[in-house]
Image (cartoon, rainbow, N blue to C red):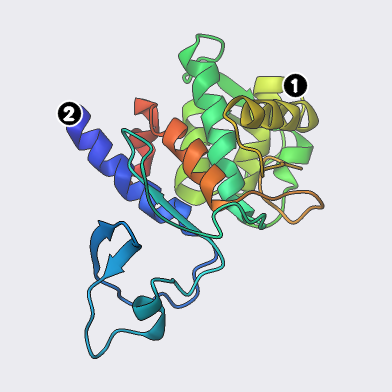
Amino acid sequence: MRKHLLSLGLIFLLIFVFIMLINMPSIALASNTAGGLNYAQTAESPPEARTGRLPAKSAYLADYDTGTVIFEQNASAKLPIASMSKIMTALLVLETADCGKLDPESTVTVSADAAGMGGSQVFLDANSQHKVKDLLKAVIVCSANDASVALAETVAGSETAFVDMMNKRAKELGMKNTHFSNCTGLPAPENFSCAKDVFTMTRELIKHKMYFNYSRI
């Protein structure tokens, strides 16, 4: 089971760490050599494959178990990461649950602020009640902004306090090029991360078995 989960985890790392990919072509990866990542060469290989670069602003690929870097490209560049901010949101909720301070079966009353979130949402009504596990499911499966804020308020008392927790945890994990302004990823000043830091928090997230209850949906 652990091998299965780790295999799934590697898949999710591959999905999350490639930031801002634009019309990614199919590129066959060959071996990691002293000169950098070597690509299989074909007549159809795009110029990026021949130069060892991807058509992306930033990328980072590393081994889950060892952290060994396989490929990186502008990996520390600060970029808006939008809803990938919810990687840290989900991580903090799961850590709070795993240490016994939050019962996944407990009920949350949705505030007007949470219900009023725009963007990606599951249209929670103000004063409606939902279980923590269902709100977490909405965050992981639907990238729900309303559910994210409802959970943030439950864990920390307010979204502002929760964001402070997010930034504190980022520092603890050594994420030097990350700063969160909210728990949703909605556009805001000083809300950014980098491919390397996204790898770091995703690697931490998939240590939690409960995550896979929803990521497999």
Local crowd at mark 2 within 10 Å, few (<14), some, or many (≥20)?
A: few
One can see residue 128 in this view: no
The tag on residue 185 is: none
Residue that appears at 30% across and 73% down: 27
Which of 89 and 131 lies nearest the eye of the viewer?
A: 89
The residue beneath circle 1 is 157
Which of 82 and 51 lies nearest the eye of the viewer?
A: 51
**Does residue 183 sit above or below 58 in this rendering?**
above
Which of 122 and 164 lies nearest the eye of the viewer?
A: 164
One can see residue 52 in this view: yes
**Does residue 209 sit above or below 10 in this rendering?**
above
Amino acid at pointer 1:
Gly
Side of 120 where 117 appears, left or right: right
Side of 25 where 56 appears, left or right: right
The residue beneath circle 2 is 1
Which of 146 and 12 lies nearest the eye of the viewer?
A: 12
Side of 54 where 148 appears, left or right: right
Amino acid at pointer 2:
Met
* Residue at the front extreme, as displayed: 34
Q: Element type at marker 1?
A: loop
Residue 196 x, y percent position in the rendering:
52, 47
Q: Earlier in the sequence, mark 2 or mark 1?
A: 2
Q: Element type at marker 2?
A: loop
Side of 111 where 193 appears, left or right: left
Residue that appears at 30% across and 75% down: 26
Cα–Cα span, label 2 and label 1: 36 Å
